[in-house]
Image: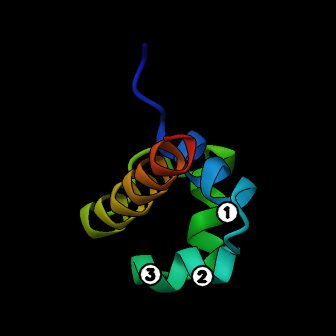
């Protein structure tokens, strides 16, 4: 099992119904930053942005596990 990339984490959040705007607001950045991370134009986002995306994705993973139980 491999660790998902930032782009994969953002795509999972989008697939779960989050919007670019909601992700960007939670991460404290512009929607364009989220789009650029998703498309690979930004490979290593600012630490605070990456941490926020990681936390949102972790919450999504926990919700999926809870729903499956």
Give the side of residue 42 with respect to residue 14, left or right.
left
How many other residues sit within 10 Å of disc 1, few (<14), some (14-19) or many (≥20)? Answer: some
Secondary structure of the residue carrying tag 3 is helix
Q: Between 46 and 57, which is closer to the camera in this rendering? A: 57
| Dot 2: element | helix
Number of marks: 3
**Up-down: is 48 above or below 51?**
below
Q: Position of residue 12 (x, y in %)?
A: 63, 48
Q: Nearer the viewer, mark 2 or mark 1?
A: 2
Q: First in sequence: mark 2 or mark 1? A: 2
Specify the label residue 22 is tagged with: 2
Taking the image as shown, residue 18 lies to the left or right of residue 52, namely right
Q: 23 left or right of 39? A: left
| Secondary-structure class at tag 1 | helix
How far apart in space, not on screen, are marks 1 and 3 (Cα)?
14 Å
Colour basis: rainbow
Front-lying residue, 28 or 32 = 28
Residue drawn 47% across and 32% down?
4
User: What numbered label is drawn on residue 35?
Assistant: 1
User: Vertical placement of 69 versus 3: above or below?
Assistant: below
Tell me which residue sits at (49%, 41%) in the image: 69
Residue 55 placement, left or right of 32? left
Per the image, the residue denoted by label 3 is: 26
Asked if marks 2 and 3 touch (Cβ < 8 Å), the reply is yes
């Amino acid at each position: 099992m491999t660790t998902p990339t930032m782009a994969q984490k953002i795509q999972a959040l989008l697939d779960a119904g989050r919007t670019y705007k909601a992700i960007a607001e939670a991460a404290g950045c512009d929607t364009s930053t989220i789009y650029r991370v998703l498309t690979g134009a930004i490979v290593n986002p600012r630490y605070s942005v990456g941490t926020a995306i990681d936390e949102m994705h972790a919450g999504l993973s926990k919700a999926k596990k809870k729903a499956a139980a």
